[in-house]
Amino acid sequence: MTSEEVQARLSRIEEIATLPHVATEILSILRNQNASMRQIADVIEKDPSITAKILKVSNSPIWGFSGRIDNLQRALVLLGLKQVSNIVIAVSMYTTFNKLKPNPEFDREKFWLHSIGTSQIARSLAQQLGLNFHGEEFVASLIHDIGKIVLDQYFTDIFVQVLHESHAQKTPSLELEKRYLGITHAQIGALLLEHWKFPQSIIRAVHYHHNPIAVDTNKDLVATIRLADVMCELWGIGFDEDIQSVDLYSDSGWRTLKYFAPRLAQLDIERFLFEVDREIEKAKMFIELVN
Amino acid sequence: MSLLNKIRHGARMEQAVKPDGTNVLDDDVFYQIRDIIYHSSGIYLKDQKKYLIETRLSGRLQQLQLTTFQEYLEILKRPGENEELHYLLDSITVNETSFFRNPPQINAFQEVIFPRVIEMAQKNWQSRIRIFSAGCSSGEEAYTLAMIIYQQFPQILKEFTVDIVGVDINREVLQQAIQGRFSKFSIRNLPETYLNEFFKPVGASYQIDDRIKRMVKFYKGNISDPDQMKKLGQFSIIFCRNVLIYFDKESKKRTLQNLFNLLIPQGYLFIGHSESLHGISQAFKLILLNKAIVYQRP
């Protein structure tokens, strides 16, 4: 496929889906530095179905406040404005993209389990390292592979070919994407999020989640997503069949994160991996709550 | 107050016994027991294993004339040489040994690690590929590896001499290993193809084929003794599963030092799938595989 054809298809990217109104408004409010809880609450309350889902998610073991959050105000007070906003964005993204036309070659369920599993692992990792991303790690992980959905919807033939070839030859799908399209799912995902005016931090995390060394800002967030992604791939729910092994301490995510979170060197990583199952359970819970 | 009244008044029951006679294990007590096990042996019990503790230890509680797991916990917490801890470890690992134990690790060996070892051997002009089963017990692990190599990598046996060495401190289990006769229980996880190809029923037992027996040598020895271990030569892969858990910290460190020295550079070490080297050794690289970990000598 020529570069022009690729560009032509990508220019239609806004057609892929419309972000729910509530998400667009929240994103817009967040861009304004002086967002207030009142503003956020007002926007969310306009969408009762999202509100209900937010309360369910905030109340579940996923967030660790079970049984204590029965209204939005409380959610905002206990979790903070940014966390709640990020939960809203995450829930909206999931609901939106889940509605797209299915493709038998693309296991959507496994895709979402991997994405949500990654977000749980990222949350847990950040917590244990004492890093506070206000829930951005949750959103960014959830949508880190959103570019694959674009590929699935707009470049279906090539996408299927990449899936088959990476599975058969164990070639990294990233390499195949570059070869056949000249662009990767990471870059495509970032493009989509730019279009939707997501915060730059999340765009960067999605763009560089395979290569945290290449980015200059938000390195800690990007590295966290990277690590959570490989851990989920190998110890949680994997989606790519092409990753077989990771030399952990040499991994770009690990090396980058160590710089920002010295605690990482002390982290009992074996134990963390043994506990990944728990995060996968929470991921499954999220899907149930939000569907 | 009678029991019935206690329930009516919503009084919190200190301890309850389930209809089948097992004691109830509170999450909180379970987490503490889990931590004690983890810090002393390196075995991590996932949440799903709570049931295992509940059932395996209820009988023990009765033996010790205890009524609650909280009381049992107090015994475990006693400082110094702890008999009960050893008993506990035994009870959670009992009947663990079998052929093809822990499929993800065996898979990792077959799909990723052994192929890499072959590549290394080719690059380094080695004529032998050596594998060590440290704490080999009755030999299931060593023979499992032999069968996989024989079955899945037949051409390698033409290119290299493959030596598998098993060492254990217990003479009895070694005898069994050398004899190569196994019970139905031992072979329960064996894929049918391997069973049919490499085992012959003899009475109620199963005898392993000579082709596989020839690939493995067993010796009596103590893997925490550096002098003894030095004599074994070097290996590309070492398996040391469910062995370190019984050692105290010092012995663990010493054994790992031995194992490190026994590995060729870039050689691999597999320990138990719920075991961790955290806090014991920082000498190895950690390689993440599909639902398995392998350590590598730099």
Image: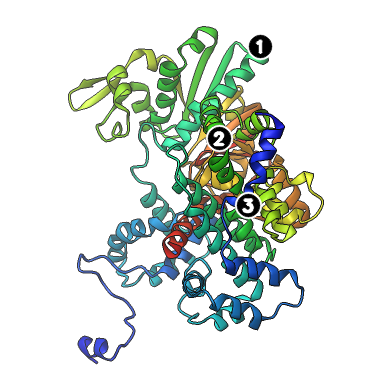
Residue assigned mark 3: A14
Of residue A291 and residue B247, the one placed in the foreground of this image is: A291
Q: Nearer the viewer, mark 1 or mark 2?
A: 2
Helix, strand or loop at disc 3? helix
Badge 2 and badge 3 both on one subunit: yes
Badge 1 and badge 2 both on one subunit: no
| Residue B44 in the figure: left or right of residue A224 | left
Q: Position of residue A88 (x, y in %)?
A: 57, 68
Q: Nearer the viewer, mark 3 or mark 1?
A: 3
Residue sitting at x 38%, y 17%: B213
- Asked if the residues shown at circle 2 and circle 3 are in contact, with their CB atoms under 8 angstroms apart, the answer is no
Reply above or below: B289 against A62. above
* Mark 1: amino acid: Trp
Quarter in which the N terminus of chain A is drawn: top right
Residue sitting at x 43%, y 65%: A289
| Residue A186 in the figure: left or right of residue A54 | right
Helix, strand or loop at disc 1? loop
* Mark 3: amino acid: Glu
| Residue B177 in the figure: left or right of residue B117 | left
- Calculate the distance from the C-alpha at mark 1 to the C-alpha at mark 2: 42 Å
Mark 3 crowdedness (10 Å alpha carbons): few <14, some 14-19, many ≥20: few
Residue B297 appearing in the image: no
Of residue B174 and residue A48, the one placed in the foreground of this image is: A48
Helix, strand or loop at disc 2? helix
Of mark 2 and mark 3, the one earlier in the sequence is 3
Label of residue A159 in the image: 2
Residue assigned mark 1: B125
- Quadrant of the rendered image containing residue B117: top right
Q: Chain of mark 3?
A: A
Reply above or below: B256 against B65. above
Mark 2 crowdedness (10 Å alpha carbons): few <14, some 14-19, many ≥20: many
